[in-house]
Image (cartoon, rainbow, N blue to C red):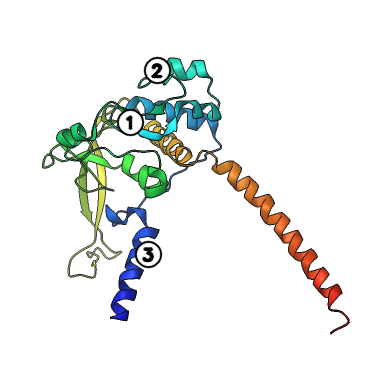
Amino acid sequence: MIRKLCAALMALLALSANPAAGAGAATKLDRAPIDIRDVASLQGGARSFVNYCLNCHSASLMRYSRLRDIGLTDEQIKDNLLFTADKVGEMMNVSMSKKDGKDWFGAAPPDLSVVARSRGADWLYTFLRGFYRDPSTSTGWNNLAYERVAMPHVLWTLQGVRVRTEATLKNASGKDLSDGQGGVRKEVKLETVTPGSMTQLEYDVLARDLVNFLVWMGEPNQVQRKQIGFWVLLVLGILIVLTWLLKKEYWKDVY
C-alpha cells in the first residue's frame, strides 16, 4: 500500500513539474527565444495579444495600465490597444461568456493571465507554431502540441495553411529504425501548402513576441524580483561570514 501511495505521489510530482504532460507531452518542444527585458518584443507581443487573442481569451488579472511598464503611454494604449474597455485602468476582459465559448468551441477559452506559468514558454511557442489542417476535427485544425485542440488557428492568414506529414527514419545502412515497441520510428513534419502573408521567419518572430508578452504578463515584476533576490543573497552571504567570525571570536577560549 505504501509503495502504491509513493508511486502515485511521484506521478503527481512529475505532472506538476511538466506542465505540458497533460497534452502533447510526446511532442518535442521548441526552445522559445524570449527575453522579457526586450521592450520592443513585449510591445509587439502586446499588440498581437490584443488583436488576435483578446477576442476570445481574457486576461482578467491584468490591467491595461500595466502596459506602461513596457514603455507605452496612456495615449498609445487608448489609440492602439484599448478595444475591450473604456478606461486604461480596467482589466483585460472580453464580452464573450464562458457559456457562449463552450457552445461555440466545445470548451470555454481559458483565461491567459498566467498561462505562461502553467504551460511554460517552450510549450506556448511550440503550440503557436504547431497548427495544421485536419478535416476530422470540428474546427478543421489540429495541433502537434495539443492533440485535437478546440481552438481554431486564428493566425492562419499570417502563417499559411500547413499539413502534417510523417516519414520513416532510417539508419546509415538504409534500414528502418525501430521504436522499441515493435514498430518503426517516424519523424513528423509540417509542410506549407498555402503560404501566408508572413514568411516563416516573420511568423516565428511574431510567435516569439507573443510568448514573451505572455511570460511577462504572468509576473510583470519578475525582473525586479530577480534583481532584488540577487542583492538579498549577497547580503545574506556577508551576514553568514560575519556571523561565523563572531562565533569564532566568542568560542576561541573554549576551543
Q: Does residue 26 appear to the left or right of 114 in the view shown?
A: left
| Numbered tag placed on residue 1 in the rendering | none
Closer to the chain start, of discs 1 and 3, is: 3
Mark 1 highlights which residue? 53
Work out which quarter of the rendered image holds the N terminus and state it.
Answer: bottom left
Q: Which residue is drawn at 38% across and 30% down?
A: 49
Q: What element carries label 2?
A: loop
Q: Which residue lies furthest to the right in this view?
A: 253
Q: Which amino acid does label 2 sit on?
A: Asp
Q: Which amino acid does label 3 sit on?
A: Leu
Mark 2 highlights which residue? 86
Measuring from the top left, give residue 145's x and y in whole percent: 28, 48
Q: Which residue is drawn at 19% across and 34% down?
A: 99
Crowd tier of the residue under label 3, counting other residues whose Cα lies within 10 Å: few below 14, some 14–19, many 20 or above: few
Q: Is mark 1 on a helix, strand or loop?
A: helix
Closer to the chain start, of discs 3 and 2, is: 3
Q: Nearer the viewer, mark 1 or mark 2?
A: 2
Is residue 30 shown to the viewer in this render? no
Confirm or deny contact between disc 3 and disc 2 (CB under 8 A): no
